[in-house]
Image (tube, grey):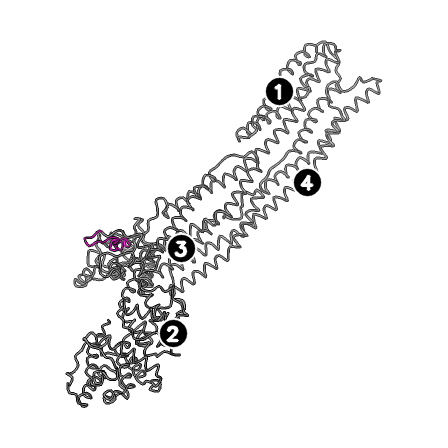
Amino acid sequence: MVDYHAANNQSSSGAVQTYMEQENDWDRDLLLDPAWERQQRKTFTAWCNSHLRKAGTQIDNIEEDFRDGLKLMLLLEVISGERLPKPERGKMRVHKINNVNKALNFIASKGVKLVSIGAEEIVDGNVKMTLGMIWTIILRFAIQDISVEETSAKEGLLLWCQRKTAPYKNVNVQNFHISWKDGLAFNALIHRHRPDLIDYDSLRKDDPVTNLNNAFEVAEKHLDIPKMLDAEDIVGTLRPDEKAIMTYVSSFYHAFSGAQKAETAANRICKVLAVNQENEQMMEEYEKLASDLLEWIRRTIPWLENRTQEKTVKDLQAKQEDFRDYRCVHKPPKVQEKCQLEISFNTLQTKLRLSNRPAFMPSEGRMVSDINGAWHTLEGAEKGYEEWILSEIRRLERLEHLAEKFHQKAAIHESWTDGKEAMLTQKDYETSTLAEVKALLKKHEAFESDLAAHQDRVEQIAAIAQELNQLDYYDAANVNARCQKICDQWDILGALTHSRKDSLERTEKQLESIDELYLEYAKRAAPFNNWMEGAMEDLQDMFIVHNIVEIQDLITAHEQFKSTLTEANMEREAIQSIQAEVQKIAQSNGIKLSGSNPYTTITPESIDNKWERAMAMVPQRDNALQEELNKQKSNDTLRATFATQANAVGAYIKDKMEEIGRISIEMNGTLEDQLTNLKEYQTSIMSYMPEINKLEGYHQLIQEALIFDNQYTKYTMEHLRVGWEQLLTTIARTINEVENQILTRDAKGISQEQLYEYRASFNHFDKDHSGALMAEEFKACLISLGYDVENDKKRSGQMVSDDFRALLISTGYSLGDTEFARIMSIVDPNGSGAVTFQAFIDFMSTETTDRDTADQVIASFKILAADKNYIMAEELRRELPPDQAEYCIARMAPYTGPDAVPGALDYMSFSTALYGESDL
């Protein structure tokens, strides 16, 4: 049974007194209802007997057995634990009245105002007054002191019932009459605290008698709560008596009140386990995200380091498109993952510190520094890959141009040399006349002149072939073979030319007649013809330029060439006049010409034809040069457009980086205001993303136009990408820092003023605005906050008294070299020599606030284990939520103490492991 001795506390609140007065003013008309009166008689009698039996007695008739006041006084002594005045043993009416008055006076001394209840009425056996008096006693000693979440008495008891039965279906406790009529609420109360006694799922709402009998019998048998009502008393009335139900329910409350401590202990354990489970989940998410990011970097770097050369510009441009896709599609999500990884790591470390857990150490190779190192390697490979692609494009363009030029010159040369060997090896001079021999000799001299003129072309062909080899041209083997064939043939032609000249000179002495006009024609026609061939070759020559200056140089050279055409035409007409003079002399002298000029194969018709072809090529060259000039002007416009956007973006990024630096230093307003402002600032920055995308579009147009330089801006797309990524990362880190400060403030109870003081001191000594303090700056910052860190007696420029120094030392704030080294190991565990603001805040909050400890968790488990040194699995499952109970069972080692029993679990070592070895 429940001990009500504690109910004698005299300090009843005003609210409780008011409630008692309202309840004492009871509705006497309602007691006229026989059903209610019968319920109250039965309930109040059972309640009184549950206490009187402790004194070895009981009552049978509530209005008769209290008439002499003896058992009434005995009841009050049992439930209050106090001694009442000695009762009078006489049988007279006056003795009975005196005894009852002693009982009523005792009730009144407990702060209870008795309304319309007198001793005479009790002595006379007035049922209504007797029941009213017993109800007043029940209110004062069984219900008044019930308190649940700042509510007490009836409201507190009702709230307790609602909380305990909330999870159960078909149960909705709103009062102390109809809500209990189907019996499910009574069964739910028992099942909530002792699920082993009730099979709640087997109960039916449409069978209230069975439900009520089940609850009353279980309570009487296992919970020592006497049966105060019969099921028929409740089911048989439209509205059960509220006071009877409240009396019955209060017995359940007091029977289960001991479970409150266990519930509190379970809540503490649940809180600790929830934090641990959340931290473990964050650790697993970090490990997975880090592994995925590192694996992506590991796969990407070999691709960026691949320098396999392509054969054509088209193939290399496909690689460039793949690289652009990587930069714009694949990399940006990875940049976000890297930033999120750092934020998750910092948040996890903050939560671990705030919950007094050991710091998280990722698996080997998955530290933030490892990821940053791998990322740095990736960006290095990325930069080298882009530069290699651009240089390869230039190289292949140069190669294709040289190869085409080589084959063009080779084809012209091969066309010229075709048949030359046969001509040089013929023996026509052996049967020729003197005139014919002289003609052959002159013709050969003209050939030698032509041959010398072609020497430059052969040297150009060899030089181009050599350059193609130096640039590692993929088809160098065929080029070399063709070049070698040309050189070998050229050597043969030189040798044959020399041999034929010797033969002609041996026969020259026998030949006297030479046709001067033919000779002069041949001498002048050969170089002019060669000049025309060179001019046509130049007019058809391909060109590659990269800016306006280069194309203007080509246009200038072309204009200079056109300026020589008048003189060249005069030379052509002069050459043609020689042939006309020959015809004139032949006609005037009746000479019959045997055929073409014996000294040359160049005919006037061929000269005119080549001249016409060359003149037709001039406007074509004009058009080609003008088209290229227009293209370069367009490219220059692209450069200017890109430069304008790039200069604007570069200035924007620079300004925003400086603003973020100022914001991180000033940090005005509350942390929540700062966080809101920073997120709005971040949104403002992200709204600038279309300008970045616009710049990317301009950059793509420039690359497609093969523009490799830009004199209008100092910015490159790579620099601006890096600056943009740094801007986004910086604002994200600043937001994360403020969020961690909020976590620290809320978890450690640090006031806003303290955070302002810490921020002001930190910013004051952060002279270079780097966001971190060097060791000496950190020591000076501690001094400014009241720490004595010097061996002499100077403190902030003033003398510190011996008493004040002793006070600092006695409170643990005297920091010598050893102590300062210890603090540095806390705030700078990596030994970088710098202290971040977050590390500074964590240290200050740790020094100024309390933390949960392993001892507190051990004490909570001890309550659940009923003061045993071990705990059983069924106790954990009964007191904790299922997932957290199984979490403990899976991690607790078997208990091996001297009092161990089968299945015992060691909750002490489990609790200390939650906080690491430092709390042992």
Mark 1: few/some/many CA within 10 Å (<14, 14-19, 20+): some
Mark 2: few/some/many CA within 10 Å (<14, 14-19, 20+): some
Residue 789 coordinates in the image, percent (x, y): 23, 57
Circle 1 sits on which residue? 490
- The part of the chain drawn in magenta is 896-915
Circle 3 sits on which residue? 733
Task: Using the image, tell me which numbered label, if any, was put on residue 179.
Answer: 2
Give the CA distance from mark 2 to mark 3: 56 Å
Q: Earlier in the sequence, mark 2 or mark 3?
A: 2
Q: Are marks 4 and 2 in contact (CB under 8 Å)?
A: no
Q: Is residue 384 above or below residue 245?
A: above
Residue 441 coordinates in the image, percent (x, y): 70, 15
User: Which marked residue is nearer to the observer: mark 2 or mark 3?
Assistant: 2
Residue type of the residue flagged with mark 3 = Arg
Q: Are marks 4 and 1 in contact (CB under 8 Å)?
A: no
User: Which marked residue is nearer to the observer: mark 4 or mark 3?
Assistant: 3
User: Which marked residue is nearer to the observer: mark 4 or mark 2?
Assistant: 2
